[in-house]
């Protein structure tokens, strides 16, 4: 991909990005979102807004044999089902703690993917159950920056989902 000075770019494999300051033989000097200058290979960057969420997910899963947790994709939101049977084929060998950690990790990955694709809303479907996942999820979200969260639309999800607004 060819970049021009002034292009806003994101890293393909991790959160963050910046503004192109110089381009030289496959290398791009970017001023990162944090204000630092860094030379990086052009093949790990994408111009912001060029990839829809589906392609970001495909690039993230390249080489992985993993079931996707995306249920629905639209340009304005991402819906992710955190039920353990959606994340792994067999869960009998996992402890409750391991399952919870996997679910929280998937939620964190979904938020990072949404940020990279500039999706402003993520619906995390956690179910009702005993409320342990919901409690831990809300605790994790409370420690994250640049987002608000609240119970998702009751008419659509019942009491089993959390809506996250990214900014």
Image (spheres, rainbow, N blue to C red):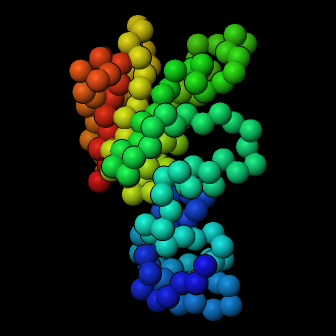
**Residue at left 70%, top 51%?**
62
Can the viewer see residue 31?
A: yes
Q: Quadrant of residue 26?
A: bottom right
Q: Quadrant of residue 150?
A: top left
Residue with the most extreme top position = 130
Q: Quadrant of residue 59?
A: bottom right
Can the viewer see residue 37?
A: no
Q: Is residue 37 above or below residue 45?
A: below
**Residue at left 58%, top 13%?**
96
Report the side of 123 relative to 93 (left or right): left
**Residue at left 37%, top 35%?**
123
Report the side of 158 relative to 60 (left or right): left
The quadrant the N terminus occupies is bottom right
Closer to us: 49 or 36 = 49
**Residue at left 63%, top 92%?**
24
Residue 9 percent coordinates (x, y): 48, 73
Residue 155 percent coordinates (x, y): 24, 21
Closer to us: 126 or 102 = 126
Residue 99 percent coordinates (x, y): 59, 20
Numbered disc total: 0
Q: Is residue 51 above or below residue 28?
A: above
Residue 69 percent coordinates (x, y): 55, 34
The quadrant the C terminus occupies is bottom left
Q: Is residue 164 above or below residue 160?
A: below
């Amino acid at each position: 991909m060819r970049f021009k000075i002034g292009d806003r770019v994101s890293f393909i494999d991790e959160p963050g990005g910046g503004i192109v300051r110089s381009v030289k033989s496959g290398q791009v000097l970017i001023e990162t979102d944090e204000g630092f200058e860094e030379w990086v290979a052009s093949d790990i960057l994408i111009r912001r807004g060029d990839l829809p969420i589906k392609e970001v997910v495909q690039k993230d899963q390249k080489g992985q044999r993993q079931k996707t947790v995306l249920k629905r994709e639209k340009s304005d939101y991402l819906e992710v089902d955190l039920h353990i049977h959606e994340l792994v084929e067999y869960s009998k060998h996992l402890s409750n703690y391991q399952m919870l950690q996997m679910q929280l990790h998937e939620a964190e990955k979904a938020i990072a993917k949404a940020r990279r694709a500039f999706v402003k809303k993520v619906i995390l479907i956690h179910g009702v159950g005993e409320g342990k996942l919901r409690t831990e999820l809300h605790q994790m979200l409370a420690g994250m920056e640049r987002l608000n969260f609240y119970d998702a639309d009751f008419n659509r999800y019942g009491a089993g989902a959390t809506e996250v607004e990214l900014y």
